[in-house]
Each structure stands twice: as structure tokens, then as C-alpha cells.
């Protein structure tokens, strides 16, 4: 299993658009064969901070996710236009 945590900060005033795009990503990604979990989050302390918590069966499944048409539509052509700060970290289980 591979875990990806993506933290991002969006431009003020774009929070609702971010949530809309994240919901669309959740809806589509959860149907992927290699997706175990895919959840979007909004900070309780800063409404412009968001995060995705993603679990996949393998790194290959994650790469397939990045190559879907909806990833391009909702992330590359959507979120990328309103996000100005992003961090990505990959993890594997400890035990």
C-alpha cells in the first residue's frame, strides 16, 4: 500500500470552488480499482488550507490515478489555477 498526503493553500475567495473540485475528485477517484481511500479535508483553523488523504494498493495505482481524464480536468485545469502553495508526501505503512 502507498499513501499520499497532499496539503495545499488556495487563493482567498476560492474556497468554495476548491471544495467543489475536491468533491468531484473524490467521486471519481473512489471508483478506481486501486483506490483504497480518498478523502478531502478543509482546515478548521484556516479556511484556505485543504488536504487530500489518499491510499492506493500500489504506486502503480497512484500513477494510473494521475493519468486519468478527470485528474487532468479537476486538478491540472482546475485546482492548479487556484492553489498557490502545495506539498506532497508519499508514505508506506510502518508495520
Image (cartoon, rainbow, N blue to C red):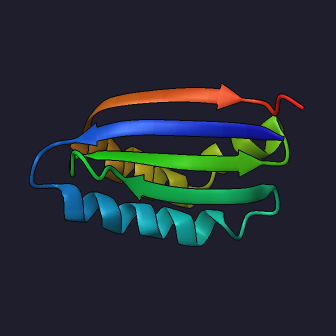
Image quadrant containing the C terminus: top right
Most extreme residue toward the right is: 95
Q: Nearer the viewer, residue 31 or 38?
A: 38
Where residue 55 appears, as percent x and y from the top left, is 71, 48
Q: Residue at x 44, y 68 (%)?
A: 23
Residue 50 in sight? yes
Where residue 67 appears, as percent x and y from the top left, is 64, 46
Question: Compared to 87, does 41 lie above or below?
Answer: below
Dividing the picture into quadrants, the one containing residue 58 is: top right
Question: Compared to 84, does 19 lie above or below?
Answer: below
Where residue 91 appears, as percent x and y from the top left, is 70, 29
Most extreme residue toward the left is: 13
- Left/right placement of residue 87 relative to residue 59 reads left
Image quadrant containing the N terminus: top right
Q: Residue at x 66, y 67 (%)?
A: 30
Q: Residue at x 33, y 63 (%)?
A: 19
Q: Nearer the viewer, residue 48 or 85?
A: 48
Q: Residue at x 55, y 59 (%)?
A: 39
Question: Compared to 68, does 5 lie above or below?
Answer: above
Question: Compared to 46, does 87 lie above or below?
Answer: above
Amino acid at each position: 500500500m502507498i499513501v499520499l498526503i497532499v496539503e495545499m493553500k488556495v487563493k482567498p475567495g476560492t474556497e468554495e470552488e476548491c471544495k467543489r473540485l475536491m468533491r468531484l475528485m473524490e467521486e471519481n477517484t473512489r471508483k478506481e480499482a486501486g483506490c483504497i481511500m480518498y478523502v478531502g479535508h478543509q482546515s478548521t483553523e484556516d479556511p484556505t488550507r485543504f488536504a487530500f488523504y489518499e491510499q492506493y494498493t500500489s504506486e502503480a495505482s497512484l500513477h494510473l490515478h494521475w493519468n486519468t481524464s478527470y485528474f487532468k480536468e479537476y486538478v491540472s485545469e482546475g485546482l492548479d489555477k487556484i492553489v498557490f502553495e502545495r506539498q506532497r508526501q508519499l508514505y508506506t505503512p510502518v508495520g
